Image (spheres, helix red, strand yellow):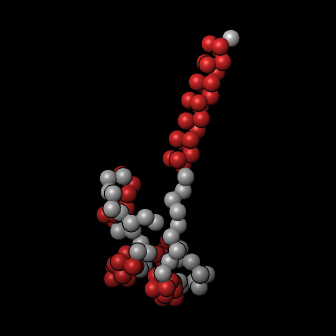
């Protein structure tokens, strides 16, 4: 009877560890709040490139953003640079900004 009880408790502990590990890998990253400067730049870019005035930038509108404005938004932390995006998807960077 004790052997069965120990085996069942061991299996329950192992199952709890597996479930906890799965929760840790599937959680969404925390969203950070935008600063006043970031909000102002975001509003400026929306006004400049939102051609259909729906309050969102669709695929075509995002494609029309100039290189200079993309750099401005990346520097402000509103866009991920291609370098940072590649590093965060591979997990090789430890100093990439959290978004």
Whole-percent x and y of residue 2?
A: 65, 13
Residue located farthest toward the right when viewing the structure as drawn: 1
Whole-percent x and y of residue 18?
A: 55, 35
Whole-percent x and y of residue 30?
A: 52, 63
Image position of 13 (left or right of 92): right
Q: Nearer the viewer, residue 66 or 90?
A: 90
- Rendered image quadrant of residue 69: bottom left
Residue located farthest toward the front when viewing the structure as drawn: 2
Image position of 32 (left or right of 12): left
Q: Which quadrant holds the N terminus?
A: top right
Whole-percent x and y of residue 11?
A: 60, 25
Q: Height in image: 91 above or below 6?
A: below
Q: Is residue 66 visible?
A: no
Image position of 49 (left or right of 72): right
Residue drawn 35% across and 68% down?
81
Image position of 4 (left or right of 78): right
Residue drawn 35% across and 63% down?
96
Q: Height in image: 65 above or below 28?
A: below
Q: Height in image: 11 above or below 62?
A: above
């Amino acid at each position: 009877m004790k052997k069965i009880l120990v085996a069942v408790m061991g299996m329950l502990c192992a199952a709890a560890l597996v479930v906890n590990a799965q929760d840790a890998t599937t959680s969404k990253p925390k969203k950070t709040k935008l600063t006043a400067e970031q909000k102002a730049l975001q509003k400026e870019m929306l006004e400049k490139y939102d051609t259909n005035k729906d309050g969102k930038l669709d695929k075509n509108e995002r494609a029309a953003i100039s290189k200079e404005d993309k750099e401005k938004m990346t520097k402000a932390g509103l866009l991920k640079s291609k370098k940072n995006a590649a590093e965060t998807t591979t997990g090789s960077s430890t100093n990439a900004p959290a978004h």
